[in-house]
Every structure is written in structure tokens, then in C-alpha cells.
Amino acid sequence: MNTSIYAVTFDCEDAAKLAEFWSQVLDKPVDGDASADFASIGLNEQTSARPYMMFTKVPEGKTAKNRLHLDLTSADLEGTVRRLVSLGARKGKEFTESGFHWVTLTDPEGNEFDVIAEQT
């Protein structure tokens, strides 16, 4: 039996709006059928590398810290954090631990994610 990750799905208030934020973060287009109820990145073409990203409208808002989050990497941590904040992210705390340096941010709907400095 072979199991693999198909998609990372975000529960959200406005699927198209949150998909557009992540589209800009990752420089990948939102699939053409995006709506406020459902949007995706890479799902319709299925030519991009998995996991795909899906965004689904739910009635309840975020109430607690994510138990699962995305980790992005960047050769220019400071510049990437500035760019993501200009797209609508909010900067949180900065950490250096176990040989890694990263910044925690939140997307426009409050989902936490980290940007980690690439190790040289």
C-alpha cells in the first residue's frame, strides 16, 4: 500500500481571498474556478508537484493556535518576511534554535506559518 499527501487544506472565511494570498506567496496561480466557498492551487492542472493546496469556507472562525503549519525556506529571510508582510501576513516572533533561524508569521486569516533561513 502506498500512501502520499494529496493536498494541504485550509479552513477559512473566504477561500478565493486566502488562495490569492498563498498564490502570491508561492508564485503559483490560483485555479480558475475559485470562489468564496472553495479555491485551490495546482489541483485542476495536477501537473505541479503535490501536495496541492485547497481552501474551503467553513462557518466558524479560527480560535486557537494551529497544531499543524507550513514551513517555508528562504535564502533571504529578512527580505522574504518583508515581502510576505506587504502581501498581508503579520509578523510574529523570531527564533534561533537547534541550528535553525526562523520567523513565525500569520496569513490574513490568522493561520501560523514559519519562514526558515536556508542553511549555508
Image (cartoon, grey):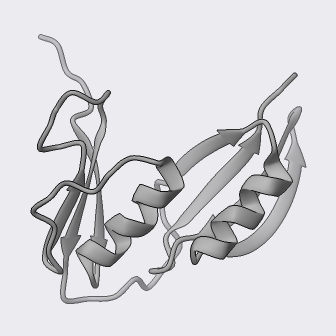
Residue at left 68%, top 72%? 85
Q: Relative to 8, does residue 45 appear above or below in the rendering?
A: above
Residue at left 13%, top 77%? 37
The one nearer the camera, 5 or 40, is 40
For the C terminus, the quadrant is top right
Q: Residue 91 at x, y = what percent?
A: 73, 73
Q: How many marks?
A: 0
Q: Residue 73 at x, y = what percent?
A: 67, 39
Q: Relative to 17, does residue 44 appear above or below in the rendering?
A: above
Residue at left 32%, top 51%? 29
User: Within the image, what quadrant is residue 58 found in?
Assistant: bottom left
Residue at left 28%, top 84%? 13
The one nearer the camera, 26 or 107, is 26
Q: Residue 109 at x, y = what percent?
A: 45, 80
* Left or right: 11 as drawn, with respect to 100: left
Q: Residue 49 at x, y = what percent?
A: 32, 27
For the N terminus, the quadrant is top left
* Left or right: 61 as drawn, with respect to 27: left
Residue reaching furthest to the top: 1
The one nearer the camera, 43 or 5, is 43
